[in-house]
Image (cartoon, rainbow, N blue to C red):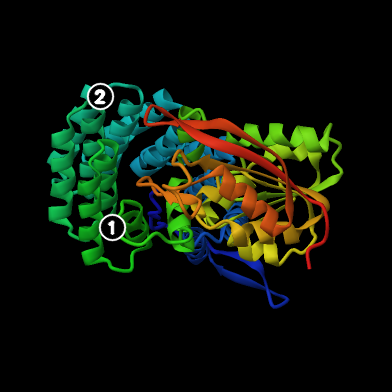
Amino acid sequence: MDFGVRAMSEDPGDVPAWPAGGTETRMELTDALALAVHLHRQRHFAEAEGLYRTILEAVPDQADALHFLGVLNHELGRSADGIELIERALAVVPDDADMHNNLGNVLSECDRLEAAEGAYRAAIALRPDHVDSHNNLGIVLKEQGRLDESLATYRHALGLAPEKLETLHNLAVVLRKMGRYDEAVATYLKAIELMPFDREAYRKLARLYYLRGQIEEATATYRSWLSHAPDDPMASHMFAASGGDAVPERASDEFVRQTFDGFSASFDKVLERLQYRAPALVAEALAGPLGAPDKRCDVLDAGCGTGLCGPLLAPYARHLAGVDLSPAMIAKATGRDVYDELVTAELTEFLHGRPAAYDVIVSADTLCYFGVLGPVAAAACGALRNGGIFAFTLEKSEADEAAAPDGFHLHPHGRYSHTERYLRDTLAEAGLTSVSIAEAVLRIESGKPVAGMVATARKTAAVG
């Protein structure tokens, strides 16, 4: 979202900031606002929010502080408050196209598409050359199924800025949705020609090849991407997933972090479209071993994402913690106001640091980024108290044991599947006793059901 701050035409005086070293500091309002925006960009959300609110205590109608505090509230999952704050800012400066654009972004991500369209059109009426608003208008038109209008909007945006990569990416998406695959490929190739280091164009082009079943072309795209960025974690993982390199034991931390930081804004909406069932499935699996919810358990949501499991786990929890590698996902989970503790950390390392801390550990759609499960299963066992329950989902390998001798397989979409035999052996080796392993459809992807397993296991004795 746009973080441009207008210059102020009059002396705003100074405002108090937070206490530093026991002494309250003071700074010019313009400096305070610039610092708040910097903290916001660096994802220091609590500090940024505190400074925005301090500014507004001094100057209640300071439009930029209202605007950016609104954006921050949305990023923290408090979207209704975010919309109200941005609308208050626009009441002060109704002719600010950037604010209208950001209001449209928040409304769009809340699936209020007609209202978002109105906000983008208001921005364009103020500034007909506001390319970002044309781009975003094209997105909401696409989401409403108005593909011809969306296509025309992107063509117009390209007329304003012919080399804007975001417009080319969005145009390619619409062309793909219209079934014009060759044109979509050509559009991504145009983006790569304009910017040979454009990782998003490589990623999206490779995914388009994957969706069309052109795995060799996808592999070649990842190889080309790696030639420009040999250390890129996304390119490295997906190259291996497409058969171009040795399969890693698990996805790297940076691959997972980048994937889900980039996915956080649209995560819930996309999963709703995919008929995502993993949180409900693990919650149902807990009902057998735990019985009726009684808020007596210390519960960990391992790989909590935006917190979709949180409301389902809360009835069991006297203390509910969540851990995830993605700071952006943690920020979204914070806005649900259901967790007692949220931590940004790698899962296995986090579990090692919490010996015998939990009665229940739940992991929905997280272990599909691990091939070798032994270390994380052992760490989960160590973090459970005796009698504790570990409930989780995996994607089920359709290959027979001979075709998956290691017990897992890395697929071109970047996730791992596992065989049931490998799962049972791993749980036993970790000191966990299988309670149940049930097959289930986790979601619908590319029009096909994703076969999974919902597993529950119990720690029955201390492991030396």
Badge number at residue 54: none
Q: Secondary structure at mark 2?
A: helix
Single out the mark in the foreground, 2 or 1. 1
Residue 462: x percent and y percent?
A: 82, 61
- Residue at figure coordinates x 69%, y 66% from the top left: 352
Q: Residues within 10 Å of mark 1 (few under 14, many from 20)?
A: some
Check disc 1 and report the residue beneath it. 244
Residue 60 in sight in this render: no
108 horizontally vs 343: left or right: left
Quadrant housing the C terminus: bottom right
Task: Return the residue nearer the eye: 289 or 276.
Answer: 289
Task: Return the residue nearer the eye: 198 or 247.
Answer: 247
Residue 164: x percent and y percent?
A: 20, 48
Residue 81: x percent and y percent?
A: 59, 38
- Residue at figure coordinates x 58%, y 52% from the top left: 330
Amino acid type at mark 1: Gly
Amino acid type at mark 2: Leu
Q: Quadrant of residue 220?
A: bottom left
Sequence-first tag of 2 and 1: 2
Residue 185 in sight in this render: yes
Q: Is residue 224 above or below residue 148?
A: below
C-alpha separation, residue under disc 2 versus residue under disc 1: 35 Å
The answer to whether the residue labelled 2 contacts the one labelled 1, judged by CB atoms less than 8 Å apart, is: no
Q: Quadrant of residue 452?
A: top right
428 horizontally vs 275: left or right: right
Residue 209: x percent and y percent?
A: 24, 42
Check disc 2 and report the residue beneath it. 147
- Residue at figure coordinates x 32%, y 21% from the top left: 145
The residue sitting at the front extreme is: 402
Task: Return the residue nearer the eye: 374 or 111.
Answer: 374
